[in-house]
């Protein structure tokens, strides 16, 4: 749930010194994976490094350098990178604090963009949220991911094979690509949501049961997770567009506008799903109560028909000495006749009133 | 449903290279129909072409050229047009991506406007949404439609017959006309919606049944489709009005304001329908529960009258040896009298309490 | 209903040429009534004309000229006026299109203001909406009304009798007066609405019945009609205030601000009524369900008391050969005693539980 | 009710000449009370006048003059004051029109501020609303009150006794003081509202009855009255702060900001009460339905236990010639045994299912 | 409850002189605790003073002075501090008025920031709210707390031990730290809220009972308290950021932005909780009604099966002389057979209809 992250934050942070590097998130033991990429139009270089210092040796200042850190639990690496690239202490803190709201911060020497990668396990509605942080400098991009679900592989492939224009552009285009692929990925979540809602709607029509309410509450929570991921990105890109920074070239701004349009569409879709799930809830509740009412009506009608009949047979079960009907030869048959007539009258009456 | 489009997008686009031409929409086999129009005050020329290259030969730079492409599944045509008219790669991508939100993009050499054409099959509520893209250049208009439901025929007729002022104006006026006729067309949808809602309201009063809830959920969905089509157009026209572009002349801006007014009115109407459909739902639920309550009340009243009577006849059905009433000559008649009195008392009491 | 107007629009307009003069509204056969007024501080002239050309002859350019057209189905008159006063084609179209949303348009040579006059038949809630269009030029005011419900008579009287300052001011003050009297008139509608809501609230308390829901839906619709008339006027006056036009003098702007204040108040009142009608609905539904529950509770209590008693008498109605109680001399009386005791116990128990 | 005021307005104003002095409100016969105050740092003068002309004689132009008019039904007094102080006709009209929305108007020579004084009778929820109008000139303050509930006495006392800094400041500080004391007074209403809501909440928990719904609708109405009084004041003070007028000194602006903060807090409080009253309604409805359900459940359980038993005793009440059980010696006792067993089984089953 | 504070205000303030020092809050008898801190990079001095005059003696103008007042019921101390540091009368009043909404005021010589410290007793939901006021001058910070729950101890510790950068920075950084630690503390409240809501949600699933509604109303109230504390801080920090004051250095502004981000996140979390609690309420109500319906259905089914059977046995309990079935040898067994068949038929029918 969305709030779990908040807990994590509060548990470790309250009273700590601002700007101090504390990793907030699930601790992991594995070594941090460091992907090093360096490219220009003609050549590219790719390395998986064990050691962050190697980055500083390998790097040259003319090509685009992309350092992708998979795993942020090793605060030392962040510290060293921060020192080398001269990153603001609050920026370093934000990379480590995975409970952060997506946001963009424009510093003098770099742009910091942190947002969420969302994944779902197959067949589950539950959205897993991981933090991705990007730092765009004058000729480098740093990317930080919490775990190794690697979203960025298609981009690496493009760099290797020179597909698209990534090799012809500078690091701001790479920065855009990393954002774009993450936002594109949200559509998968939306697609799953869509399937889930369709099924839910069908369930309500076919076989409404109490799980619907729980499912709808679950949908609500997942929509919150999604909204919390998408909404601030939109804000952030607007903010980025307004900032007069040299780090993002005009050509790339057009592409960022495209990402912005996607987040607007995603936001609208989320609102639509909220609306539709409210509609499903109403249909469910009304269907339930309608079915219940139908049952109760039929049952009550049955009782209502038999109760007067039972009274009549009760009458002739009385033991009075003087009850002339009892001795009449056809009394029994007359009584049956009367009772059948009464039943028919009642049924007809109910039909007239459209109760049956 | 609105979300179906989103699925299409995500299915084909995630991870693809930005600016690459991929058609997103139902594949079709037919040849693309190319309508070529060229006119000025005095003359006009009209051709249906098989081949996009013919456009480039036929075109002269002094007249207004209108190329209308019916069918966008042939990405090659878009590519060639894009190269000839020097259209931005993202613009070309947007033409092909039919899942896009309506929007306007102002480029240096042209204005790109994409929006939805909405149609309904006769007697159906379901709205079919198709994408229309317009490109306004210095002396040409390109229009792209998904299928061959041809909304633009009245405009062609006007060009041919010199009706109206279209032949006297430049291509920005044609651009306006194409938008205007699409927006005008939305009123048809609204009209059908109106009829549908009226019928629904009548149904609720006459014969409320469970389909009402499904119909209302359906109305909700169609209103979302409508809103998704109309709302962004309004935004787009405001944006267009603010842009300082030479491509749209001041005289035409007045006309675009008129289109803007229509979209405002449409938006308000959609909100009204949302509100009214909520009202219908409430009336339906209340009517249902009122009717149910009436039935249950009457049935329960019947039971309540007979249950004490049944008790009384039960009393005289007991087999005690010593029950003096049983041997009384008029016991049976007294009992009947008492029971009738009791029933009348109860009915009167219920009437006093306004329960009957 | 609000939407009926929309239908009218769509029925005649779709595909027609923008700026073409087509009257949209109920056709009428009567001749159009032309009221001609011309005045200055010293003198005034008043004529009812048969022929629009007479206006052009009578008019002089130093006095204030007010031409009031009652009936807009004669498009020729509008056309001639338009030509004489050099009115923009879209303006002329807007005068004829009675389905338009209230709005103001500032042209170079005139201001166009179109809005709604609302009337109610005595004792009816249903609001009838008619369009009024005003054109304010440098020294003339044109007013167009759909039908002959004449709201403007008090103003004519004032001109004739020199009451107020209308004769001392220029045509912008007359323009303001015409708007002011229409907005003032909305208060009558609000007053009726108020009475209607009061009655409805009383009905809910005294004798809640299913008509309440229909009445509330009706109130909702009329509030929409009212809001659609009032809200855009407010917008329009704000727009007018911001425009730097010479046609409205600073002195008159103060008066327009006053009209603006009234529309703000009307808007708030409409929102309040929406809120209050929601409150009435809730009270109604709750009252209904409370009453129903009370009835069912009492009825069920009666059943609950008699069912165990009926069981007991059933026991002694059994025909077993060996049932010692049956032969006891006081068995019958003991049974009665037990049953009375049981009933009392149950009633006391129900009272303790506050069920009775 | 809020709307009553609207009625008053419409009844008298429609069609009247703008700027004409018509008193809108309950007519009263008493003489208008005129409080005259004139003070500077050293001295002060206080008079209760019968005649408005005396004000003009007594007044000098160096001291602060405060004329407080209690009763605005004498339009002549307003007219004379208006002429003497050169007040705009619309301002004079606004003083008399008690149906006006609180607002501020900045004229060239004065500031006009009209707002509501709210009072409640002891132990009643109903809020009485009276209009207060202030006119701040270069060296005078005029205040107009509808009736004689005198809120301003503490300020008079302060002037007399030189308490606070009022005697050291100019008339803009007095103007502020009059606004401040009125806004402070709103807190009393809020306090009463708070008590009332607390009681209501307690009632819902202890003894929910149908009056709760009416009380909540009443609360809603009073919150509207309160909001209508408070909300526009906030707007007005913001407007005042933005105006570049010499009449209010920078030092006093700080104090007005303080009043603004109070109105913000009041607005939030009103919204909170709206929210809380919705919560109370939901709790009430749910409590009611919960209690009802509990009753019905128990009653139905009782019936359900006895109905099968009644069937069994019915079986042995049959008169077949050949019913072996009837002649068995222990048949009667076996039957009882079976019935007791059955009852116990059912009770246990209901307990298992947590129905009891 | 939130409103209690409002009461306090109104009870003591109405009619009092603006700027006069009146303590609004629970009176306390204990002596006010004065914490005095003075530090620079090299040294620091810490004293607990009995007497406010000592502050003025100890203070030097080059170091950062931090005076922390625990307890604001001694108005004299505030008065003396106010005189010494030349604080505006309204500022002094605001320190004492604990009912104030969080806000920032920028004066010429200082910045005043007042906000809420929130605490919860262990295991309770109820939030206790205390006011904290900060005054930031050119080289001093004053802090005022209502009671002795000391939130600021970690900061004192940092100053003593030179942990973090607080000793290297000026008083604006200290000012930030005091705000930051308070906002950080809100996360604890949020965490508790989260636990509480989780439990509530579980209760609804496992064992829904009427306390849920009260708990939800309680949650609503606490969320209001939280929102009232958090929302205005955000506003205040935005305001602070916009002010061009020398008192806050650019370096510190970055840190304040961080606090701002936290308040944005807190606000969103509060909105999410509001939404989720609405979801819990809906699930609760639906679960309750579903369970109830299930019970009633089963019970009614039992009745419906037995009522016709009871009728049948009633028939053969009649005492007619001529009832052939009674004398048939197998009549009794046939009757049983028929009744068993009837029951089975009904059960099967109910199963088919999915009523069982």
Image (spheres, coloured by chain):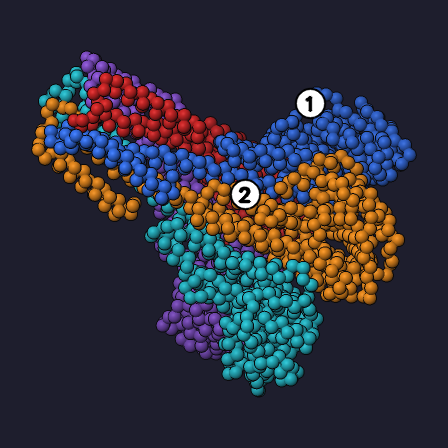
Chain colours: A red, B blue, C orange, D cyan, E purple
- Residue at screen point 50% across, 32% down: B207
Instruction: Tell me the quarter of the picture where residue B353 sits.
Output: top left
Q: Nearer the viewer, residue B349 or A158?
A: B349
Q: Is residue A255 above or below residue B84?
A: below
Q: Is residue E249 among the parts visible in the rendering? A: no
Horizontal side of B89 relative to B220 (left or right) equals right
Give the residue drawn at x 33%, y 52%. Answer: D206
Q: Where residue D320 appears, x then y in whole percent?
A: 19, 18
> Whole-percent x and y of residue C267?
61, 54
Q: Could you tell me which secondary element the residue under label 2 belongs to?
A: helix
Residue at horizontal 62 percent and vertical 48 percent from the top: C121
- Tell me the residue that label 2 is attached to: C217
Residue farthest along the bottom direction in this orientation: D42
A148 displayed left or right of A265: left
Q: Residue at x 23, y 25 (%)?
A: A316
Image spot of residue E45 (x, y percent)? 46, 71
Asked if residue E350 lies left or right of residue A222, the reply is: left
| Nearest to the observer: residue D98 or residue B56 | D98
Res C85 seen here? yes
Residue A152, label in figure = none
Question: Of tags 2 and 1, which is closer to the observer?
Answer: 2
Quadrant position of the C terminus of chain A in the picture: top left
Badge 2 crowding class, 10 Å Cα cut-off, few under 14, some 14 to 19, many 20 or more, is many
Disc marking residue B28: 1
Tell which subunit mark 1 falls on.
B
Please give left or right for residue B203 compared with residue E161 in the image: right
Based on the displayed image, in which of its 4 quarters is residue E342 positioned? top left
Residue A305 placement: quadrant:
top left
Percent across and percent down for residue E294 are: 36, 33
**Label 1 crowd bin: few (<14), some (14–19), many (20+), radius 10 Å:** few
- Tell me the subunit letter for badge 2: C
Between the C-alphas of marks 2 and 1, the distance is: 47 Å
């Amino acid at each position: 749930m969305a709030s779990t992250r908040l807990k994590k934050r509060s548990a470790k942070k309250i009273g700590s010194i601002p700007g101090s590097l504390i990793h907030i998130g699930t601790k992991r033991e594995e070594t941090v994976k460091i992907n090093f990429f360096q490219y220009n139009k003609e050549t590219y270089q790719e390395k998986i490094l064990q050691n962050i210092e190697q980055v500083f040796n390998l790097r040259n200042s003319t090509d685009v350098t992309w350092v992708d850190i998979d795993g942020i639990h090793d605060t030392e690496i962040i510290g060293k990178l921060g020192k080398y690239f001269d990153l603001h202490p609050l920026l370093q803190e934000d990379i480590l604090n995975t409970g952060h709201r997506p946001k963009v911060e424009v510093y003098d020497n770099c742009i910091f963009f942190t947002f969420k990668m969302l994944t779902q396990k197959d067949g589950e509605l539950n959205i897993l949220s991981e933090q991705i942080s990007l730092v765009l400098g004058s000729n480098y991009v740093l990317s930080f991911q919490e775990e190794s679900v690697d979203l960025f592989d298609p981009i690496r492939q493009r760099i290797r094979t020179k597909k698209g224009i990534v090799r012809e552009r500078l690091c701001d285009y790479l920065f855009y690509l990393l954002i774009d692929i993450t936002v594109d990925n949200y559509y998968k979540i939306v697609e799953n949501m869509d399937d889930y809602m369709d099924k839910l709607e069908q369930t309500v029509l076919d076989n409404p049961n109490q799980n619907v309410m729980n499912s709808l509450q679950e949908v609500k929570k997942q929509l919150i997770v999604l909204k919390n991921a998408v909404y601030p990105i939109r804000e952030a890109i607007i903010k980025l567009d307004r900032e007069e920074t040299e780090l993002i070239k005009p050509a790339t701004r057009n592409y960022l506008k495209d990402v912005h349009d996607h987040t607007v569409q995603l936001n609208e879709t989320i609102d639509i799903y909220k609306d539709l799930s409210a509609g499903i809830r109403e249909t469910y509740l009304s269907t339930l109560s309608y079915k219940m009412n139908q049952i109760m009506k039929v049952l009550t009608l049955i009782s209502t028909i038999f109760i007067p009949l039972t009274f009549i047979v009760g009458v002739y079960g009385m033991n009075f000495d003087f009850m002339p009907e009892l001795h009449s030869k056809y009394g029994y048959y007359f009584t049956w006749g009367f009772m059948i007539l009464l039943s028919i009258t009642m049924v007809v009456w109910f039909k007239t009133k459209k109760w049956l």
